[in-house]
Amino acid sequence: MDNSTQLCQPSTGQEDDWKNLYESSFPVDERMAVGEIRQMLQRGSILLHKTLNKSNELLCFSLTFPAANSDFLLLSYIATDPTKRSGGFGSKHLRRLIEILKAQFPNHIGLFLEIESTKESGLDAATQKARLRRLDFYQRLGAKRLCKKYLLPSMVPGVGPRHGELLWFEFGVKVIDDPVLAKVIAEIYEKAYNLPVTDPLAQSILAQFSGATSGGAPSTCPLPPAAAGATGSGTTVAQPDTSAQPTGGAQPAQIVDRGPDSQDAKQDSIGDAK
């Protein structure tokens, strides 16, 4: 990356470059209305950062949701222009974003995000490969991974949830153990998906943390060899997630975090969200 690249710059979101990439990267049923996002940007309830090249062309953008009255942040959307992935701009953007957020929110515990499950049974080879690559991208950057069942509530009323995974980047302010994770998950469901903790879906996930005490080892998965610094491809074979998907009255989400897919395997770059 040359010195003329404008890395992870804050934006008010009034321009259309991020809007165009956002609308081309995410399906309609996973997108917030652009007008709503712009209103949230004006209120400061969501943050937009953009990486631009020397010609002021958009390379990558991210939208981050600082959960109201909470001590964590949620990476809501992130995408890289598919024609400009070979420069590794996605990973550089995310590294810089974490630095910015740690400085801007010194008392926050970390940046959380959701991806589609790599452990779901019945995936075709291409889908499995894409999901593993996405997971590997985040873990190479230092993300930790929840080793419990996690579900993504549907944005469409009456449609069942999907299997997902919860990842996070720790800021070093507080130990993120199981009681902390349970609290974060409850707040993500309530504030990002408008799903009360009394909903059967939320209850099925939070029940896994029943009896957890502070100071215990968190339910994190070990890093794959490449992310831990060993040689090799860095791709691990995930075990199928055979847990049943509970039904529940999930409401449309206000914020949806869809992890990126680093499709350029030769470069450490970030790709569009699914």
Image (tube, rainbow, N blue to C red):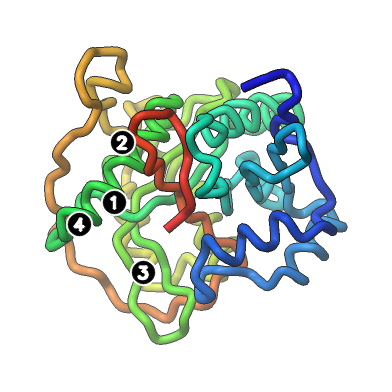
| Residue 88 position within the rendered picture, expressed as x and y whole percent measured from the top left | 51, 30
SS at mark 4 in the image: loop
Residue contact between numbered discs 4 and 2, judged by CB atoms under 8 Å: no
Task: Report how far apart the C-alphas of labels 4 and 1 lie in the structure.
Answer: 18 Å
Mark 1 neighbour class, 10 Å CA radius: few under 14, some 14 to 19, many 20 or more: some
Mark 2 neighbour class, 10 Å CA radius: few under 14, some 14 to 19, many 20 or more: some
| Residue 101 position within the rendered picture, expressed as x and y whole percent measured from the top left | 69, 32
Position above or below: 163 against 104: below
Task: Report how far apart the C-alphas of labels 4 and 2 lie in the structure.
Answer: 18 Å
Q: Nearer the viewer, residue 64 or 245?
A: 64
> Nearer the viewer's eye, disc 3 or disc 4?
4
Mark 2: amino acid:
Ser
The residue under the point 14% across, 59% down is 121
Q: Quadrant of the C terminus?
A: bottom left
Task: Report how far apart the C-alphas of labels 3 and 2 lie in the structure.
Answer: 19 Å
Mark 3: amino acid:
Leu
SS at mark 1 in the image: helix
Mark 4 neighbour class, 10 Å CA radius: few under 14, some 14 to 19, many 20 or more: some
Q: Which mark is residue 201?
A: 3
Residue at the disc numbered 4: 120
Residue at the disc numbered 2: 219
Mark 1: amino acid:
Gln
The residue under the point 31% across, 40% down is 133
Q: Of the two numbered discs 4 and 1 on the same chain, state the one appearing first in sequence.
A: 4
Q: Of the two numbered discs 4 and 2 on the same chain, state the one appearing first in sequence.
A: 4
> Nearer the viewer's eye, disc 4 or disc 1?
4
Task: Report how far apart the C-alphas of labels 1 and 2 lie in the structure.
Answer: 10 Å
> Nearer the viewer's eye, disc 1 or disc 2?
2
Q: Is residue 195 left or right of residue 238?
A: right
